[in-house]
Image (cartoon, rainbow, N blue to C red):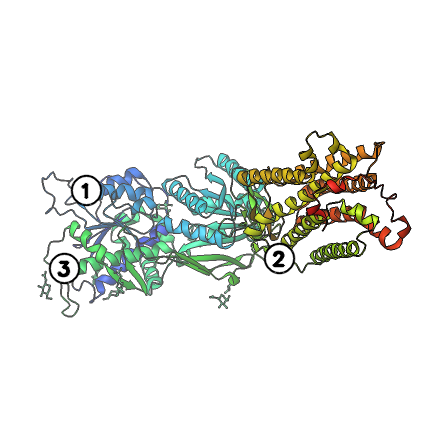
Amino acid sequence: LYSICPSQFLMALFCPIPLCFSFYSPGYQQQLAMRFAIDEINNSTALLPGITLGYEIHDTCNDELVTTKLAISFLSEDPSSSLAMQCNYANYKPRVVAVVGPNVSGLSMLVAQILDFLSIPEISAGSSSIKLSDKQLYPSFFRTIPSDQNQADAMVQLLNYFNWNWVAALVTDNEYGHQVLEVFVQLALSKDMCVAYEAIFPRGQDEIQRKQELVKIANQLEVSRINATVIFSHSGEAEELLQVVAGRGITGKVWIASECWSTSSAIALIPNLNKIGTVLGMAVESGEMPGFQEYIQKVLANTELDQKSPNVLEACPECSYLSLANFSKFFEVFNTYKAIYAIAHALHQLLNCSTTHKTCDADRDIYPWQLLEELPKVNFTIESQPVHFSKTGDPPAGYDLLFWDWILPNNHTFAVVGRYDASTHKLNINESKIRWSTENGKAPVSRCTQGCKPAQKRWLRGEHNCCYQCEDCPAGYFQDTNKPDECTPCSKNEWSTARSTTCQPRAVEYLEITDLIAIIMMALTVLVFAQMVAVTGIFATYRGTPAMRYVRGFPLQSILFSTTCFCVSFPFFVMKPTKEICKVRQPLFFGSFTLILATLLGKTLQSVGLDQILRRPWVRNHLMVLCIVVNAALQGLLCLFWYYWEPPVLEENTDIERTILLQCHDSKFPGFGILLAHDYCLAVICFACSLVGYNTEKKKDNVAAKSINFAMLLILIIWIIFVPTYSTTKGKFVALFQVFAGLASIFAIFGSYYYPVCYVMLFAPHLNTDNHFCLSQDLPVDKEPSARDSK
Ligand SMILES: *[C@@H]1O[C@H](CO)[C@@H](O)[C@H](O)[C@H]1NC(C)=O
Ligand SMILES: *[C@@H]1O[C@H](CO)[C@@H](O)[C@H](O)[C@H]1NC(C)=O
Ligand SMILES: *[C@@H]1O[C@H](CO)[C@@H](O)[C@H](O)[C@H]1NC(C)=O
Ligand SMILES: *[C@@H]1O[C@H](CO)[C@@H](O)[C@H](O)[C@H]1NC(C)=O
Ligand SMILES: *[C@@H]1O[C@H](CO)[C@@H](O)[C@H](O)[C@H]1NC(C)=O
Ligand SMILES: *[C@@H]1O[C@H](CO)[C@@H](O)[C@H](O)[C@H]1NC(C)=O
Ligand SMILES: *[C@@H]1O[C@H](CO)[C@@H](O)[C@H](O)[C@H]1NC(C)=O
Ligand SMILES: *[C@@H]1O[C@H](CO)[C@@H](O)[C@H](O)[C@H]1NC(C)=O
Ligand SMILES: CC(=O)N[C@H]1CO[C@H](CO)[C@@H](O)[C@@H]1O
């Protein structure tokens, strides 16, 4: 612990402070750096000209009691007295104006709280705890070492850079360790990393027990397959652990050193350490101090300089046996140097020093609270490194990323392979400078699960979100890069195969007149018209023959008219569907079909003589017309019921992959099913009646009955087949089934009834007799509404 006061050289210690028993050479080196800086400032004519700085140096012994006593003693006016009670301390001058140190965060907090009483600024070169950035708690604390927040951030960026997300964190058992672990875990979580193992270094005095604990830690690292371990600890603890690790022959892992041990030569010299894997470390950016080596040599050679003050020698008998080889370059030395200069610059301002006149207002009284106000305004560079303090008292210092390079087994260098910039908070790494100790020379892997391939979703297992299984996205889903954990369904108008990262637009499909099957269908329809023309032509030619009398008995015009309507409905099934077409086509289709069947039913009733049962002659005489009108009305009512309930609509069907099927949706219920059911009933009745005609002894017209019977049988079969086929098939051709069933029905009627008659007329004139057609003289034909039938 050093303190500075702008007065005379003070080194006398009056307070009975406990003696410290171990010598800490880096501490001694820091102390030399401080003296070197003060010497430079005293010599300088630019900084504090004519002003001589004095100092006290104390050993904290790494002990809270010692440190507390020291801090309290700084509050008094002179070393011999204690703190005087006063009402107002504004004009109170303690014997120090600023304190530099101590080196650990726990002690710094203690000191900062005590010094805060008189607003004495404290600058630490080695206390990196995040808590010290809290200006509410520690308003008079400053530091030249970056906060652990930055270090944890740099570490997480390093792990993230190499894709290591299955990591371990080992920390030392003190304020520093607990704090940094908390922050590190928090940052790691925010980057989706898993700190699979956390451990705190054992602290006991018993070395054997400590070794056992360390063996447990090393075991755990091996068992968990963790390949990247971050160690936030002092060099002593890291050394002990790495000795255990090297002794157990663990290889191929990555060890990441915190700033406390990243430049420890003692650790680098552990036998076989070069085999344990790769060591990377964060080192606080350090600078050169020209002339410091010579200064150390001069001091060491000229120990009389120190001997003048017997107390120093008393406290430090080892100092006499030190040489330059005992010192290594480490950042706290330079940070101490910076801290002294920061105070000097603040004093320079306070004393209104003029660089041009080389004078200062030396008589001015300086109070610590004035210095505390001045320190945040300090802004200068030293050896090209900027020195200023942020609002939280933190410096603009970053980190160097070090790589421990063993050129020869016993010769190591700490190569700088990257840099963490404190202002941008970015870690830049030059990977090509790192030589990995793995077999393939590539960075080792430390992931619980290797990443999923594109278009696979993660399926977490266990508590850690780094451990998961990968699952392909199914068809119809895709993986959104913003949501890697799930498969997103494609929109309605898109499709995708399994394992897709994008969806593709569906092709719009509908039945077109240019499809082959549609052309066939239209050809058949044309054929139907052709046969109607042919049949009509033949009948016209042979009118007056018995066969024609037979046919005349048949309501030819009604059949021709309804068949024409029937055929007109067919093209509506092969056009690009529209709302109107969907509404029109089914009523037209089934209405026409009903007319055909009703006509045939009327004919059947007449031909088998069932009309004779009817009592009223009017009804009997108009049976055909009544049959047609009643059925047409019934069909119309059913159709209205359907359209009222749920009319057919145009739908974009996406049941089939890759396409949008543009089709008419004839609702499931009641749908055209009721229309079809009505027609089917007609056909069944017609079939049954004609069957009666078969067996009647009094056959009047059983040739017609037989023909109709056969036609009805075919129609029943056709539509029986149609129902399951239609309801189980999907696709644009489904609608055509209905058309083909209709076409087949027409051919069945014409084939069964008209073709035999035509055949007789054309090729078998000898059969063209009344007898053959069973025509008797009292034919009911004459009683039929002949106006409709034959003209
Ligand atoms: C300070 O100046 C003295 C001579 O004036 C010189 O011997 C000494 O080396 C200087 N110290 C530093 C640190 O420059
Ligand atoms: C701080 O200094 C004490 C000696 O005063 C030493 O024992 C301890 O190891 C040092 N700690 C660090 C982190 O440098
Ligand atoms: C300094 O180094 C010498 C040899 O290099 C060694 O014997 C001595 O113990 C070291 N002194 C300290 C205090 O580390
Ligand atoms: C500082 O010094 C300058 C001259 O170098 C003088 O003009 C000025 O008044 C001084 N300021 C204070 C606050 O003493
Ligand atoms: C420090 O001074 C330099 C110019 O000398 C300036 O660019 C920089 O912004 C200053 N920094 C702060 C924190 O005031
Ligand atoms: C270690 O390597 C450096 C070069 O990197 C070389 O200058 C030095 O002599 C080597 N030391 C030993 C002991 O081999
Ligand atoms: C990285 O280091 C190599 C030498 O090891 C050097 O050639 C290269 O320029 C460096 N790249 C960057 C971006 O600094
Ligand atoms: C650690 O490295 C070993 C050997 O390279 C490898 O088999 C193992 O899967 C790695 N562990 C993890 C968690 O990636
Ligand atoms: C403490 C210290 O080193 N003081 C020195 C400051 O510089 C003057 C000369 O400029 C020396 O005489 C002091 O010993």
105 versus 658 height, above or below: above
* Residue in front for this viewpoint, 445 or 585: 585
Work out how far the residue at label 3 is from the one at label 1, CA to CA, in angstroms.
Answer: 24 Å
* Position of residue 700 measured from the top left corner of the image (x, y, whole percent): 82, 37
Q: SS for tag 3?
A: loop
Image-quadrant location for residue 41? bottom left
Q: CA distance from mark 2 to mark 1?
A: 60 Å
Asked if the residue at label 1 sits under 8 Å from ligand 2, the reply is no
**Image x and y of residue 698, in percent:** 84, 33
Q: What secondary structure is marked by label 2? A: loop
Q: Is residue 313 visible?
A: yes
Q: What residue is disc 3 on?
A: 351
Q: Earlier in the sequence, mark 3 or mark 1?
A: 1
Q: Measuring 30% from the left and 45% from the top, which residue is drawn there?
A: 132
Q: What amino acid is at disc 3?
A: Leu
Q: Residues within 10 Å of mark 3 (few under 14, many from 20)?
A: some
Whether residue 450 is visible, yes or no, is no
Q: Residues within 10 Å of mark 1 (few under 14, many from 20)?
A: few
- Relative vertical location of residue 319 with respect to residue 113 in this rendering, above or below: below
Residue named by callout 1: 117
Which amino acid is tagged 1? Phe
Dot 2 amino acid type: Asn
| Beta carbon of the mark 2 residue lies under 8 A of ligand 8 | no
Q: Which residue is mark 2?
A: 440
What distance separates the C-alpha of mark 3 from that of mark 2? 63 Å
Which residue occupies the foreground of this view, 68 or 282? 282
> Pointers 3 and 1 in contact (CB under 8 A)?
no
